[in-house]
Image (cartoon, coloured by chain):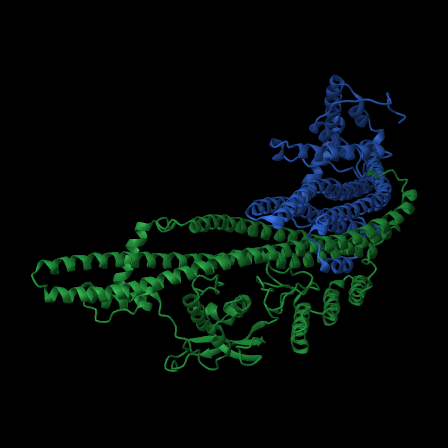
Amino acid sequence: MMGSGEGNAQQARLYTSTDAMESLVLEDNPHSFLSTSDYRSAMSGGGSMVHEAHPLAASPEQPTGKFRDSFSKGFQNSGRSHSLRDTMIEPPSYADAIFSPYMGDDLNGSSPDLGIHSSPSFTSSPSSEFLSVRVSDPQKVPETGSSLVPGGSSYVTYKFSTHTNIPSYLGSEFCVKRRFRDVVTLADKLAESYRGYFIPPRPDKSVVDSQVMQKVEFIEQRRAALEKYLARLASHPVLRHSDELRIFLQAEGRLPLQPTPDIASRMLDGAVKLPLQLFGETSSMLSPQEAAQPARGRELLRMFKELKQSVTNDWSSGKPVVIEEDKEFLENKEKLTDLERQLSYASQQAETWVKGQQEVGEVMGNLGLTFIKLAKFETESTIVPCQRVFAADAKRTATAAVKASRFYRESNALSVKHLDELHEYLGLMQALHSAFLDRNNALITVQTLTTDVATLNKQIEKSVAASSKVFGGSKSQNRKTEELKESLKNTDEAYQLSHKQYDQIKDRNKAELKRFDEERNRDFMNMLQGLIQTQVGYSKKMANVWTKVAEEAAGSSNRTSEASSSGFSVLN
Amino acid sequence: MQDFRETEKIVIRRFSDFVWLYERLMECYKGAVIPSLPGKNAVEKFRFTAEFIEVRRKALDVFLKRVTAHPELRKSEDVKNFLQADEEIWAMEKTRSTESSVFKKKPSDFMQMLKDVQSRVSDAVMRKEKVVEETDPEYERMKHYVVELEEHLAEAQRHAMRLVKRQRESGKNLADFSKALKLLSQCESGALKQTLSDVADRAEELAAKQQKQGLDLLLTFEEPLKEYVGIVQNIKVAMADRAHAYREHQELLEAYSLKKLSLEKQRLLRPDKAGDMEADLQLSKEQCDEAQTRYQRIVDLMNQDMLRFQEGKTHDLGLVLQNFARAQAELAMCTADTWGTLLPVLGSSSMTREEDAYT
């Protein structure tokens, strides 16, 4: 089964390292589980060898040396770290990654732990541009100015190391230190500027006390989550080119992005302005641009108007605007709701299944250890010779069981990584919701402004009519009409803008949806492929091990069956 | 089989009949390693699942096979009756031998039994635990061996039980996952839809096979281990019987020698009263000899059976382990094949590298 006779160099290398594994492990040594780490490092050695030889991408523009080096370096690190961490007894938790010799076509080389692409990676980039971000080196920094308070609060900074060839980034390798709050700012800014796009959701703010925040585990979890987030951003065809991201990744020192104040404070600000707005004496007329944006806290009045509009709209279905395109959108939305539900279910079941397999592997391992002990016992307390035969049988089976247990563990770790794709897309649904919300809000703004325009027009009519009643025209009335016309002009401009924005968001939605479908299709196919390959591969490995044991056992039992004329044995 | 009246006979027996036979054999063949009987399981009685019945049936089958293969046990009248007597006769025989066994003990034995209890109690109270035990080093070794063996086998059986449970659970989980994939496939379209559906189908097939294999594992791996734990426990019973018989004999021997001494004294002092005592002494000697015979029988049976046990264990458990390996190999191959049918559909250039890596 050595392929179609192509005799590829790296194939041979991988084969021999597998072979080495078989002979390396579990001789007459009952403490052979130590050699698990040997196996792992043997495999990692083989794996990275493969990757040095194997051309990572067909594209000739691929920066050769640097990228691959950092890539395979990442590999070796993970291999080593895992051979140290991993022991016989301790099973990896669900999302625990281990080194795998199998690599998907990930151009962005995200987290070093994952051998395959962890996020919907974008491979149809026009040129072979890449952007890879690593998050590392968490450091506790004491909060400045807290020296008055004994044991004052501190926060954690992370190092964001970027490696890219995108021209807008001046430079190809650089790093900055940022804290989580900066990431929140980045996320908020992106949400403001890129409405309508499927913006990957950022890691959650954790509502835990400061004690927990300090724990190594928590910090590590957060670091990993940040890395994943940055990877997703980096693989988004539009967002990767955003100023906000570039500034975040490149600007030294404090993050020069203005954090958006949260809703609460905005409400407070707006409340101050409300009385003025109610009495219509706002001297500061909103520029059309501002007016075109959905109302925020500062314009409470408009917010109320928009709210009223949305209530009238039955906004969850956006019915009043009955354009054919909208029907399509609604259909899609329903399909996506269904998809989300099924993704959630599938992700759950996948997790349960893999956990179950993990349990099987664990018990198998324990069973093996028990039989090793039994074999040792029989050998040490031999009273009659046939005990040695039994000891040999027990040992043989035990060795296989221990090997099988390891295969289960490895197979599961890989399967988990593949199946994580389901989870990834489930998380991405949040981005979809936001994008659709952007669309909805934009629509409401359009509708509000439409109503405003209509209202103003009516008011103008009335004003003109009132003026014409007075002989020679009314100066005050004419002034009013002029003011109204001015207001109408602005409002109309705002309306035009808002409509343009709404269209823009609709287009973005559509494009993103298409990209989403395509990528999901590709990623899920890859997921299934990877999963099945893993399952097949490890099942074959296990079958080989067990078959050998069965054959050896059959061979030796032919000898003993002649001897057992005691009649005690009745099993057939 | 020579001693049986007919060459082939079918009779109907219930579980309590087996229990009765088992207890009879335990009583009449002390020292022998009586085969293990499946548990009474008062709770499961109310949930007579098909599986429970099948497991029990198989265990009872093995029990009978072992009994009839045993050179001594097969001679038992009780066994013959069990296997051949018609229902009415069977009922009678059961009652008769039960009664006779109760009254088989002579009054003096009863007294002796009472005295045994008394002395043991008083010794315990007075913390004078007269440890009258055999000091044969080989036998000591064997005793320790048996005790440790039970622990090992029990641990193996526990893990076997967990493995069965987990494998079956895993099968169920896979079935659920299959359903989820099927539902997901309906949300997708094109090649992905088909692929998801295919994967779901294979998963369902595999899940069914896994579940089935779980039952096989139970019957061919866990149950035999359980049986052997039971057998080893019966070795311990035999060891206890042997210890008891040894103690009995030693005590009677001591009683006899005391009586002999007092008789000699009596002969010197009051020769006329000696007559009664002589008769008593004679009785004592008989009892002593009987006890020795009983003890010796136990020792002989035990030695014989220990040899049979070891050889049987090597053969039986060797086969169990071999079958276990074969079953695991089959399941693994089946898994690889079932999933493997999907590879051509999913295939890409990276696939061949994968397959080769795994051969």
Q: Colour of chain B?
A: blue
- The image quarter containing residue A53 is bottom right
Between B345 and A206, the residue placed more toward the observer is B345
On the rendered image, what quadrant is the C terminus of chain A found in?
top right
Q: Position of residue A372 (x, y in %)?
A: 77, 56
The answer to whether residue A295 is seen in the rendering is no
Above or below for A58 versus B63? below
- The image quarter containing residue B107 is top right
Above or below for B141 versus A492? above
Above or below for A71 versus B184? below
Give me the residue at 75% from left, 27% from top.
B101
Q: Position of residue B290 (x, y in %)?
A: 83, 35
Q: Position of residue B145 (x, y in %)?
A: 79, 51
Give me the residue at 68% from left, 76% from top.
A64
- The image quarter containing residue A43 is bottom right
Seen in the image, is A492 located left or right of residue B179? left
